[in-house]
Image (spheres, rainbow, N blue to C red):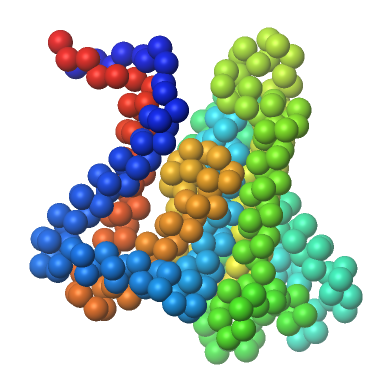
Amino acid sequence: MRLEKRNHTSPAAYVLAPVGAVVFTLIVSALLVLWAGAPVGQTYALLLQGAFGSVFALTETLTRATPLILTGLAAAVAFRARLFNIGAEGQLYAGALAAVAVGGMHGGTGLEWSPYLLFPLMMLAAALAGAALLLGPALMKARLGVDEVVTTLLLNFIMLLLVSALLDGPMKDPLSMGWPQSVALQGDLELSKLVPQTRLHTGLLWAVSLAVMLWVLLARTVPGFDIRAAGANARAAAFAGVPITRTVVLVALLSGGLAGLAGAIEVAGRTGYVTLDMSPGYGYSGIVIAMLAGLHPLGVIAAGTFVAGVLVGADSMSRAVGVPTYIADVIVATSLIAVLVAGLLTQYRVRWK
């Protein structure tokens, strides 16, 4: 068996590829549901209902989707330039810590500045903290050829250890009854609710707006062209005059900044403080979302909502039919593999010897 490059790929193939990937995912997941002894139709219906079947379910899905969209964007813009940022998890926590450091209730009062000044400073600090965590590995790759996959991955563990030390040390909330959590964010800096009596906050609007702005940047600007050119072929782009090092720095600032904002928005919109379990792997899930979206910023919105819907819907479905919630992870992982294979088959055909 060998793969042969197609001379031409029809537009219909690009449409049918993700549809086929979804069908394949549903079939594989259905086999696992049957193995668990549950009815397939009812399981899928409950999964869908648990994610989108009510106002509460929809708002919970969109709340979960907000940080996933932001970390998905962080991975998408980095991967577009072939800067493989695996450190969005650590960058998210860096942004969350920076947000609390600027806008937290230190000593019970915090910085006595106007919220109109303090809120943008808090968001800027979060973005800069996330960007700074990625800038070092990006420069080491551009200048020294150091593998950024290893450096960004290891920085996740370093950052989590730093968070643990700070939450048990200088940033610990004296009112937390011994629980390792940071000081709380000032109430005036918390994001407002989009739907009353739910957890859905205006961070969703931030995520969608940033996705649109990133799409415009990549598709309609010179820096966006440089990013796409560096990702397509860095040596050819450099020969054509694209400033590779400057482009890598820009990508690091964008990718790390988006992940840092994900941490700040989680603190300001949902938790109000930083804990070690604040993120159930949002940074790693962002990689899956970016790949499901084909590295397209607008596609990240749909992919993030899909993954959030599966995760939220699986919780209620599991209680009703007794299927383990891990089926959600299987669906997400299988859909990723299926989309990648489907995308490969749109570019290549299989030849049997």
Above/below status of 298 relative to 313: above
Q: Nearer the viewer, residue 148 or 291?
A: 291
Residue 267, position in %: x, y?
63, 70
Q: Nearer the viewer, residue 350 or 275?
A: 350
Residue 151, position in %: x, y?
53, 39
- Apparent side of residue 80 relative to residue 303 in the rendered image (left or right): right
Q: Residue at x 29, y 71 (%)?
A: 46
- Apparent side of residue 173 relative to residue 189 in the rendered image (left or right): left
Residue 84, position in %: x, y?
52, 36
- Apparent side of residue 73 relative to residue 312 in the rendered image (left or right): right
Q: Nearer the viewer, residue 165 or 77?
A: 77
Q: Residue at x 22, y 15 (%)?
A: 351
- Residue 314: quadrant of the picture: bottom left
Above/below status of 144 relative to 66: above
- Residue 79: quadrant of the picture: top right
Residue 95, position in %: x, y?
66, 59
* Total marks in image: 0
- Residue 170: quadrant of the picture: bottom right
Q: Residue at x 68, y 10 (%)?
A: 239
Above/below status of 143 relative to 214: above
Tell me the quarter of the image containing the N terminus: top left
Q: Nearer the viewer, residue 281 or 76?
A: 76
Tell me the quarter of the image containing the C terminus: top left
Q: Is residue 136 visible?
A: no
Q: Residue at x 62, y 83 (%)?
A: 196
Q: Is residue 279 visible?
A: yes
